[in-house]
Amino acid sequence: MKICMLLDNRRVNNTFHVEHGLSIYIEFQDKKIVFDTGKSGLFIENAAKMGINIADIDMAIISHAHKDHSGGLYNFLALNNKAPVYMSANATRDYYSEFLFIKKDIGVPKEVFAQFNNRIVFINESVAMNDNICLLSAITQDYPLANSNKNLMTVIDGKVIADTFDHELVLVVNDNGKLVIFTGCCHNGIDNIIQRVREHFPGTAIELLIGGFHLMDFPRNIYQESSEHIKQLGERLISYEIDKVYTCHCTGNRAFGLLKEVMGDKLDYFYTGMELQL
């Protein structure tokens, strides 16, 4: 199994482009997968630098309906004429962020639905792509969500409400009897996501967790988690007995540093340009 970070906020060197976005390339058995497409088409240029041809991708997955994960989807579909795109059926709604009373559209670009709707497979429930690849939805929010979600909204029945994050999907790959979990932003909370994975795959060990945790680098006291909360999260991640955790994107530098203090070698950052071989 090969995993490459095509796009993240940080990079291994200046050869690669960065932006506030996420895109991961996965080769597993006979499948080539793109998990998220960043905020723009920059992930395509980075892929070329890593020897990855976007036209060869077999399937694309959009983890949730925010532009920093779907903004490059139009570019992807224009270059790749075969891959279906899997996303939540709730991804067609309008989504916004609000900061200092300024509302910003952060939804999937509408031109994607206008021109490529026939390429999209909308997911209403968890789906097994094959015997070893699964998309999970319907994440129960038993643990409280991060404060950094509080400025995110959606529109349902014509009303602007707090985002429910029912558009979030989690990719799980069974790699020789151990699970590899891919998340976008963990808006539903990493604890809740791990709980959902364990419900679906009872008794199966988790080899690897990759994704952003949406703890962010907001100014102090504005949607920011306390140091104590972040360290407690690190302790819980250790208790879940995951072999290795790679975080990225929306976790934030401050939160990563605090988690690293607690988790040590169990945790590392997955930079743009990095490649993992399992």
Image: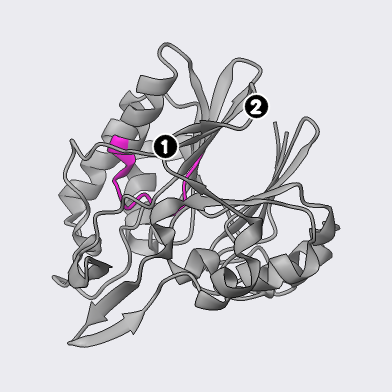
In the displayed orientation, state which residue is furthest to the top: 203
Number of labelled discs?
2
* CA neighbours of label 1 inside 10 A, class few (<14), some (14 to 19), many (20+): few
Dot 2 lies on which element?
Answer: loop
Magenta span of residues: 182-192
Q: Residue at x 49, y 55 (%)?
A: 248
Magenta stretch contains residue 183: yes
At 33% from the left and 64% from the top, the residue drawn is 216
- Left or right, 138 with reference to 61: left
Mark 2 closeness class: few <14, some 14–19, many ≥20 residues within 10 Å: few
Instruction: State the image quarter where residue 238 is shown.
Output: top left
| Disc 1 target residue | 125
The residue indicated by pointer 2 is 130
Q: Is 130 situated left or right of 78 in this image?
A: left
- Front tag of 1 and 2: 1
Residue placed farthest to the left in the image? Answer: 221
The three-letter code of the residue at mark 2 reads Asn
Percent of width and height locating residue 69: 51, 63
Q: Is residue 213 left or right of residue 218?
A: right
Q: In which quadrant of the rendered image does the N terminus lie?
A: top right
> Which residue appears at 24% of the width and 54% of the height?
164
